[in-house]
Image (spheres, helix red, strand yellow):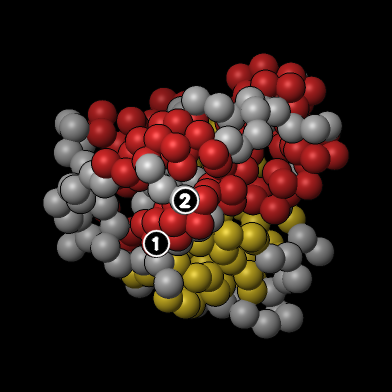
């Protein structure tokens, strides 16, 4: 049986999951994601290569890093994941940007730190405790070899994303994007996918789902999220929401 339990504290979203047949579609998150595989083998495609996280593997995702996900076999997997906003990372690290160069580590101390914070959030511990555990976790991960210099921003990608972010309550206006960059439709799709590993439509839809999640967290109103994020109806939102988060928007709201 598939289980996805979401809890939030101190601006950190915690997931405790168990799955067998469920498969995540290709997507990305605005946050950093740090997780631990507890049982089985979790597989996912990341930056064009297949990754396999075995028991006690620490999984590390940068913001907007495209990936999918599934269990290696019918035995299924259990895992936890923490989603941490980049602004929180910058605040804790005094504006030092963190980038993960290695997607999977086997580090017992780091794994235990992630599990401690996940356990505290899932069990409704005080926000002050969760904040202190996050502080410890961020400094621990920043002292490993996975910290690298900030990558050079791609002007094309930055501008394209900004235009998409400004129209999330509508449909994707691919013609406007092509005109802005002086590219044909297929040139733009190829250029965008080369830089992100995901098509413009997939990225745009993923952003709409992320904004809907934020709207639900803020207002607890799933129907407002449907309208604000330009979905046709609740069924439309639920279908895409589940492909990214494993549960429907309604189920997510009930867990907050």
Quadrant of residue 135 in the image? top left
Q: Residue at x 67, y 21 (%)?
A: 228
Does 149 sit left or right of 242 as displayed?
A: left
| Residue 20 position (above or below residue 84) | below
Q: How many numbered marks appear? A: 2
Q: Residue at x 26, y 46 (%)?
A: 154
Any mark on residue 194, and which? 1
Q: Residue 133 at what x, y percent from top left?
A: 37, 39
Q: Residue 83 at what x, y percent from top left?
A: 47, 43
Q: Residue at x 30, y 37 (%)?
A: 89
Q: Residue 175 at what x, y percent from top left?
A: 54, 39
Q: Which residue is mark 2?
A: 184
Label 1 or label 2, whichever comes before in sequence order: 2
Does 61 sit left or right of 18 as displayed?
A: left
Mark 2 neighbour class, 10 Å CA radius: few under 14, some 14 to 19, many 20 or more: some
Q: Is residue 40 visible?
A: yes
Q: Nearer the viewer, mark 1 or mark 2?
A: 2
Q: Residue at x 76, y 38 (%)?
A: 237
């Amino acid at each position: 049986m598939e289980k996805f339990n979401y809890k939030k504290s101190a601006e950190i979203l915690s997931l405790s999951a168990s799955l067998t047949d469920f498969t995540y579609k290709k997507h990305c998150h605005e946050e950093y994601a740090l997780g631990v595989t507890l049982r089985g083998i979790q597989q996912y495609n990341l930056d064009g290569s297949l990754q396999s996280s075995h028991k006690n593997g620490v999984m590390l995702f940068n913001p907007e890093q495209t990936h999918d996900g599934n269990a290696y076999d019918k035995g299924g997997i259990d895992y936890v994941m923490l989603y941490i906003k980049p602004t929180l990372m910058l605040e804790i690290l005094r504006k030092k940007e963190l980038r993960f160069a290695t997607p999977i580590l086997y580090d017992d101390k780091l794994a235990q730190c992630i599990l401690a914070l996940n356990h505290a959030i899932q069990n409704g511990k005080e926000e002050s405790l969760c904040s202190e555990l996050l502080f410890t976790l961020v400094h621990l991960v920043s002292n490993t070899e996975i910290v690298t210099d900030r990558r050079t921003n791609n002007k094309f990608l930055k501008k394209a994303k900004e235009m998409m972010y400004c129209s999330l309550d509508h449909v994707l206006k691919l013609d406007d994007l092509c005109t802005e960059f002086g590219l044909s439709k297929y040139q733009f799709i190829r250029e965008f996918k080369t830089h992100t590993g995901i098509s413009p439509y997939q990225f745009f839809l993923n952003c709409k789902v992320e904004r809907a999640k934020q709207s639900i967290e803020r207002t607890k109103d799933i129907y407002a999220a449907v309208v604000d994020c330009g979905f046709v109806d609740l069924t439309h939102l639920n279908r895409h929401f589940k492909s990214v988060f494993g549960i429907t928007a309604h189920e997510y709201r009930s867990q907050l």
